[in-house]
């Protein structure tokens, strides 16, 4: 009679516990990777839905100064009014293609009287100073602007703008409001798409983002395979010990001999012959 009582020993129960804990950790990590994959797919889907959508009036998209919903990111909005050029700001440390530079923010007063912050694009750092050599001016007078909505940015720790200049560290709309000295849309700003009339020169406009879904799906599958593999390895070790514990069992010996006979009876392929030759050469 075969002996499997060893599987109830403290040692084997410990092995099982380790395999279960390892599998739970793997499943948890697989779930996390799947969540990250889902998040990236949601961003891609939103970008596809809103980036090239028809523009809607700013007041329709953002009825209050504090209005904004994450689902509105990249939604084009249209507004008419005038740029407040005296309140222009430069956002520091904004590289483009490896070149240092700034993003140009200009508050825009709509014909309804609200002030919306427009990011007109990027300009390079100057050759001789830590500021742009030239910042193209926005159109004067009444202008119709189409811009894509973006959420305001958080503060960057202790990083601030340069005192005594129009440079700021991040598009933190509360700081922009304090610089302008008037209430502005406090939750969202806009990346300029077009200005009418168009200026003679303009900052480099933002380009459509490329969102890489990454390897999260592959990692999800790998972690699940690790979880299954833990029990597969445990079964292999169990089988080896089972055979060792029952090496003298006639029934087990006969079953093993029958399996060997079936393996020997299988048609032999060239690979099998080559393996035997190589095995013999190494003995």
Image (tube, rainbow, N blue to C red):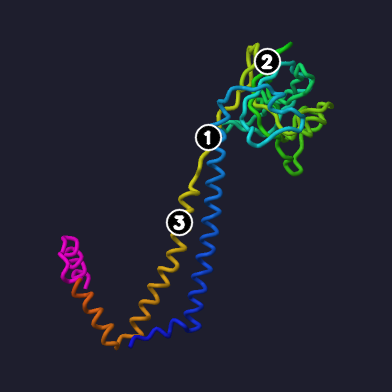
Q: Indicate the quadrant where residue 94 lies.
A: top right
Residue 3 position by quadrant: bottom left
Q: For this rendering, which residue is in front, 180 or 72? A: 72
Q: How many numbered discs, if any?
A: 3
The structure residue drawn at horizontal position 70% and vertical position 32%, both measured from the top left corner, is: 92
Task: Quadrant for the C terminus, please.
Answer: bottom left
Left or right: 23 in relation to 113: left
Whether residue 277 appears in magenta in the rendering, the answer is yes
Which residue is identified by label 2?
144
When the figure is inspected, residue 31 is found, relative to residue 142, above or below; the finding is: below
Q: Residue furthest right?
A: 181
Magenta residues, start to end: 263-283
Mark number, residue 210:
1
Q: Position of residue 272 (x, y in %)?
A: 19, 64
- The span from disc 3 to disc 2 (Cα, nearest Å) is 52 Å
Where is 178 relative to 86, above or below?
below
Q: Residue at x 78, y 23 (%)?
A: 114
Q: Which callout, 1 or 2, points at the residue further toward the start of the chain?
A: 2
Give the camera-side residue of 93 and 54: 54
Q: Position of residue 213 (x, y in %)?
A: 51, 42
Q: Give how far across and how far down residue 72 sits, in percent.
A: 64, 32
Disc 1 element: loop
Q: Which mark is residue 222?
A: 3
Which circle, 1 or 2, is nearer the viewer?
2
Q: Earlier in the sequence, mark 1 or mark 3?
A: 1
Give the distance between the C-alpha atoms of the residues marked 1 and 2, in whole angstroms: 28 Å
Q: Is residue 199 visible?
A: no
């Amino acid at each position: 009679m075969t002996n499997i009582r060893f599987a109830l020993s403290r040692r084997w129960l410990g092995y099982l516990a380790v395999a279960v804990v390892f599998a739970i950790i793997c499943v948890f990590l697989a779930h996390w990777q799947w969540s990250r994959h889902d998040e990236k797919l949601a961003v891609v889907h939103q970008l596809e839905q809103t980036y090239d959508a028809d523009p809607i009036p700013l007041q329709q998209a953002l009825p209050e100064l504090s209005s904004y919903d994450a689902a509105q990111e990249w939604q084009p909005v249209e507004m008419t009014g005038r740029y407040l050029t005296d309140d222009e700001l430069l956002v520091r440390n904004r590289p483009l293609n490896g070149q240092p530079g700034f993003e140009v923010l200009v508050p825009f007063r709509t014909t309804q009287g609200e002030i919306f912050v427009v990011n007109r694009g990027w300009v390079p750092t100057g050759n001789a100073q830590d500021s742009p050599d030239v910042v193209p001016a926005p159109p004067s007078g009444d202008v119709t602007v189409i811009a894509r909505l973006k959420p305001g940015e958080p503060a960057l720790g202790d990083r601030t703008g340069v005192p005594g200049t129009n440079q700021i560290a991040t598009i933190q709309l509360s700081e922009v409001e304090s610089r302008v000295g008037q209430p502005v849309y406090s939750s969202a700003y806009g990346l300029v798409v077009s200005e009418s009339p168009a200026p003679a020169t303009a900052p480099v406009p933002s380009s459509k983002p490329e969102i890489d879904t990454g390897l999260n799906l592959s990692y999800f599958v790998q972690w699940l395979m690790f979880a299954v593999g833990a029990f597969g390895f445990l079964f292999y070790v169990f089988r080896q010990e089972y055979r060792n514990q029952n090496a003298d069992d006639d029934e087990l010996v006969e079953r093993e001999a029958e399996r060997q006979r079936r393996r020997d009876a299988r048609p032999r392929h060239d690979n099998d012959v080559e393996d035997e030759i190589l095995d013999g050469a190494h003995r």
